[in-house]
Amino acid sequence: MAWQIPLSDIDMGLEEIAAVQKVLESRWLTMGAVTQEFEQDFTQFTGTRHALAVTNATAALHLACIAAGIQAGDEVIVPSLTFVATANAVRYVGAVPVFADICSEDDFNISPASVRQNITERTKAIIVMHYGGYACDMPWIMEIAQEFGLVVIEDAAHATGAQLDGRGLGNWGLVGCHSFFSNKNMTTGEGGMLTTQDDAVAEHLRKLRSHGMTSLTWDRHQGHAFTYDVTDLGYNYRIDELRSAIGRVQLSRLARNNARRRALTAVYRECFAKFIPEIHIPFAQARGESSCHILPGLLPPGVDRFKFMDEMKAQGIQTSIHYPPIHTFQSYREKSFPYVDLSKTEDIAAREVTFPLYPGLLEEQILMIAQAAATALKPAST
Ligand SMILES: Cc1ncc(COP(=O)(O)O)c(C=O)c1O
């Protein structure tokens, strides 16, 4: 489908092509020096102590659960209004995802009050997801975690480059998990990054990423080791040099692109308030500095959402949904994972529509989107 305005678009060009070419010419393609540089850049940019590049954020979440000591039978509190990978990671280690509700129509993030309601003696950890790059209430979440002795993992897939109280999102809990999937604020095609402030956790994650081995093929190529031991049941979740090379270029543009996303979000707020105030844009009072990964809108109750999205499509504008709640998926329903009350999640998830947002979007296109939304809302409301 040739959209007039797509949902998202990447900022990728000659610099990435040159960086990939350089790696190809070097004849070393698997994880090595370029990945180390990428990790150093990421450490500096996000203000974390350790950064470890991996194949994707799903792998990062899996390793984070292992490194956090989550085991079969443990309960882990997660949002339901997130991508399925957040909860799947809990199931990979045999633990039980317990779903907490979101805060409100203005804040789609996990509610600390709901987290507290869902704690039992089996609760081991909380995984938060910074929806759209808007910070969860981390001071409150950390306070609860401390009170009950729980580990906090941050799904920062939307939030690379975002901050709260001067601290990067992903740096509040034990481990942060970033995604470089191609619709994210920076991309390597597939790719992800683990971050942690804890030296021992970093060492554990480093081994888990590569089969639990004590040395890498790269170390042996460098003449640093002849053999290795295997100390953990690890995985092959390594990134490669081609992606790391792309990642370095993408990261160098991230601050500028996130700033552009914030500016465009402000334009959306103005245009929608003027032309289509019936559609509510959440996070007006957001905490900290968002990475503005997506632009969620909330349709008024009673509107046929798919009709609205169809009408937008007819005008060449792509929209999406973030997210169908995880607890409603068949693979989750049939396991009857526990939760107390997800009424806000269910209400918001039924009315949410995501509008186009990417650094190359133009202000005048936002005006077109607002006008198209006003046109689309009428037939969808009857
Ligand atoms: C909130 C969230 N968590 C996790 C992931 C998984 O990321 P990846 O595709 O890098 O595995 C995504 C990606 O779409 C996501 O949006």
Image: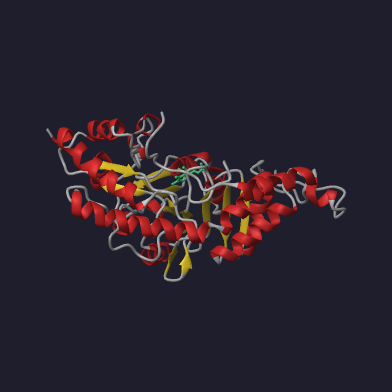
| Residue shown at 19% from the left, 54% from the top | 274
Q: Is residue 283 left or right of residue 236?
A: left
| Residue shown at 54% from the left, 63% from the top | 46
Looking at this view, name the residue that lies furthest to the bottom. Answer: 166
Determine if residue 197 is in view. Answer: no
- Looking at the image, is 181 positioned above or below residue 167? above
* Location of residue 171 in the rendering, given as x and y in whole percent from the top left corner: 51, 63
**Residue 41 or residue 91, whichever sits in front:** 41
* Quarter occupied by residue 378: top left
Look at the image and tell me in which quarter the C terminus lies: top left
Looking at this view, name the residue that lies furthest to the front. Answer: 364
Look at the image and tell me in which quarter the N terminus lies: top left
* Location of residue 316 in the rendering, given as x and y in whole percent from the top left corner: 33, 34
**Residue 179 or residue 147, whichever sits in front:** 179
* Location of residue 156 in the rendering, given as x and y in whole percent from the top left corner: 47, 53
| Residue shown at 47% from the left, 41% from the top | 85
